[in-house]
Each structure stands twice: as C-alpha cells, then as structure tokens.
Amino acid sequence: MSLISDHTETVVYKGANIKLPLFLDYQSTTPLAPQVHEVLVAALKVPGNSASSTHIFGLDAKEKIEKAKEQIADLIAARPDEIIFTSGATEANNLALLGYARQFKGKGHIISVETEHNSVLSALNELNDEGFDVTYLPVEKDGRLSLKKLEAALSAQTILVSIHAANNETGTLQEIEKIGALCRTRKITFHTDAVQALSTKSIDVIQNEITLLSLSGHKLYGPQGIGALYVKRGTPFVSSSQGGEHQQNIRAGTLPTALIAGLGEACQLAKECRNKDDQQLLHLSAIVKDKLKSELGDEIQFNGNQRARIPGCLNFTFKDIDAEDLLLSNPSLALSTGSACASTSHAPSHVLLAMGLSASEANGTVRMGLGRYVTEIEADFAASLLVEAYRKMKT
Ligand code: PMP
C-alpha cells in the first residue's frame, strides 16, 4: 500500500467514472509513459558499465547509451556527441553556466532574466560573486522578455546569455529563435533551459542558434534523476567534476544506463507525440479556462501571455484567497501554487512578482499542469471542483 492508494476513490461525474486524486501537476513532473517504463525495466535487468570495454555487458550498456544519445539529439536536431548526461536539469543548468563562464575567470558580462528557474539564478549569483557582471532583465506584464531590452543590454563584454524557452510557472514562451539570432550575430554564447518546452514545442538547436540547452527526463514522460545538456561541438568548457574521463571530461561518473535508455525513449516519443499533444492540451486548457472564466468572471485572472505559451500550463489568480489553503483543503486535485523546487519556502513566487503581481495576488495563484493522460471529462471536473472550492472559501 502507498499513501496514494490509501487516498484513492472513484467518483461519478456527468456519467463518467473519475479516479481521484487527479494528477494535474505536469509542470512539476510528468507520469512515466508506458513505453518508457518498458525500456527502463528491461535495461535495469542487465548489469553492465558502459565504460567496461572488455566484455559484452559493458558493450551492451554502451550500445543502449549510444542509441539514447541519437534519440535525444534527434529531438533537438543536434549530433549524438553533443549530448552530455546529467542528473537532471538543475545540474544541466549549473554545468552549462558555471562550466562555460569559468573559463573567463570572473571577467565578462552575462545576461539573463528575472523569471528563470532557481537553478539558473543561483548559478548566476555564484558567478556574480566570482566577479562576473550579471544583468537580470525584467519581463513585461505578460511574462515575456522585450527583445529591445535584451538588445540594449548586450555589450562588447557580454560572453553569455541564458534565457529559458518556457516558464515553469506560467508556461509563457520566450522568443528563443530571435534571441538566438541576436546572440549569433554578436558571437555570444546562448544557453536555454528548454525543460518545460520540449514535450510540445519543436526546438532546433541549429535553426535557433543555441549553443547550450538543458533538458530533463521527468518533464518529458521519462524518468526522474536524468537529464542532459546539449553542448555545441567545439564549445570551450571547464569541467566541474573530477575523477573520470567519462563524457569528454565535461562530467565524470558512471552513466546510469537504464535511466538514459528511458530518457532516449521519452525523447523519441516526444518527437512522435508533440503535435498531437499540443492540440489535445490546447483543447483541454480551453475547457478549464472557459469554465473558470464563465463561472468566476473577474474573480479570476489568468497570468502570462495567453497565446505564446505551452498549452498544458495554466496559471491563474483567485481574488482574495490563499491558494495554498484552497489546495490543501481539496486533496482530490493534485495542483500546485508554483514551482515544486521552491515549495519549501513560503515566499511569494519570484516569477509572478517580476510580472507585477502583488504578494497577495501571488499567494492567491494556482498552477494547473495538464498533460498527455488527462481526459476532457477530467479537465471539466477539475474546473468545476475549483469553482466550488473557491466559492466555499469565500462564504
Ligand atoms: N528548469 C525548469 C524550467 C524546471 O521547471 C525545472 C524543474 N522544476 C528545472 C529546471 C530543474 O529540473 P530537474 O528537476 O530535472 O533538476
């Protein structure tokens, strides 16, 4: 038995059975796709260290890793030898920023944006302490970065620009193609945290002029604990880990074959499913949004650019309530108030504050993450339950 099975129940809604609790937190993590599960379990059963070159077990592990590199590279139009495995996107972001910048030994200008994930902001704060000049650009009210502001901030000293592809709290997309082009013409390295975008958006590292890109297995219906950093061939890098020659001296340590095989499969599936997923999620989010808007009117506000966004992520603010109280008193819905990586601090979201929301508006905000395995009726049910819960809190 597990905590979840102890709390499972089935309700009938509009003639359909709905299994509760309903998982609607796909930005925090995605369920494992059945195809990925199969590949992962099969790979777990075989021993073998991909660095052992003298027997068939090591060679088998190496073959699985090479296949996964091809699948990951194919998703972003990279080459397999440009893929470096990490424990997830936190490490990929740290590695990208520290590993690239440190060759300049504290001298140079770096640009990012205030709404980045904490794994980017913290690494940049560290670089700032080492002497780098770091600019955190503000965003507009809709969460987007103004290209004019970016262009004005670029200087002859700028060595690195790090802008995420999609925000993990609001789903807002940044114009990474244009940002890549701005960087390329000035020969500036461009890093993007593409974690939240890759399951529904096509990202091509060549066309988008990206030098470094971070991704994570568990945001792509793959396993937790595995991610990757794309490092464009020829990019100079300072290794941050010592003790092994694995992965072109960029990152040391034995590779987790099964997790990597699972990540590869997840990337292949993402490429096959992303157009269909994109359409399906647009439809589901319209169901939720229409219901919340028609029932609550101006008592609810949707945050972030409503056109340029990943389709499964909805971020909305209820008027004059504490969203955490609402979620805790409604355990049938697994939703969040924001980033899982910041959930131990009860401070209002830095992303929402940067977009101009007040602290109390930020505290009244819910993030709903719809995904591949959510049905129409579940989306409708969730919206109805939220309306009911909100009204109950207000009485
Ligand atoms: N970047 C973004 C945009 C994310 O949403 C997350 C996970 N919340 C991360 C980085 C960190 O990824 P991981 O959990 O794989 O370390």
Image (cartoon, rainbow, N blue to C red):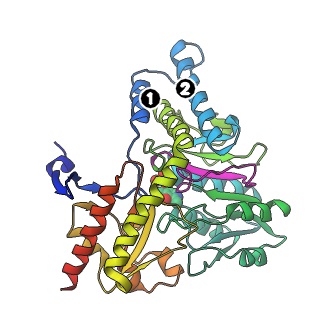
Question: Circle 2 — which element?
Answer: helix
Q: Residue at x 41, y 85 (%)?
A: 359
Some atom of ligand 1 lies within 8 Å of the CB belonging to the residue at label 2:
no
Is 73 rendered above or below residue 164?
above
Left or right: where does residue 137 sit relative to residue 353?
right
Q: Is residue 284 magenta?
A: no
Mark 2 lies on residue: 64
Q: Is residue 213 magenta?
A: yes
* 375 and 144: which is toward the camera: 375
Mark 1 lies on residue: 39
Is 394 rendered above or below residue 145?
below
Q: Residues within 10 Å of mark 2 (few under 14, many from 20)?
A: some
**Segment tinted magenta in the rendering:** 195-218
Q: Residues within 10 Å of mark 1 (few under 14, many from 20)?
A: some
Q: Residue at x 56, y 81 (%)?
A: 141
Left or right: where does residue 197 sit relative to residue 162?
left
Q: Position of residue 37 (x, y in %)?
A: 39, 34
Q: Position of residue 132 (x, y in %)?
A: 70, 69
Q: Which numbered dot is residue 131?
A: none
- Amino acid type at image mark 1: Val
Examine the image and state in which quarter residue 149 appears. Answer: bottom right
Quadrant the C terminus occupies: bottom left
- Amino acid type at image mark 2: Lys
Provide the major secondary structure of the magenta segment.
loop
Q: Residue at x 44, y 87 (%)?
A: 358
Residues at marks 1 and 2, CA–CA distance in whole angstroms: 10 Å
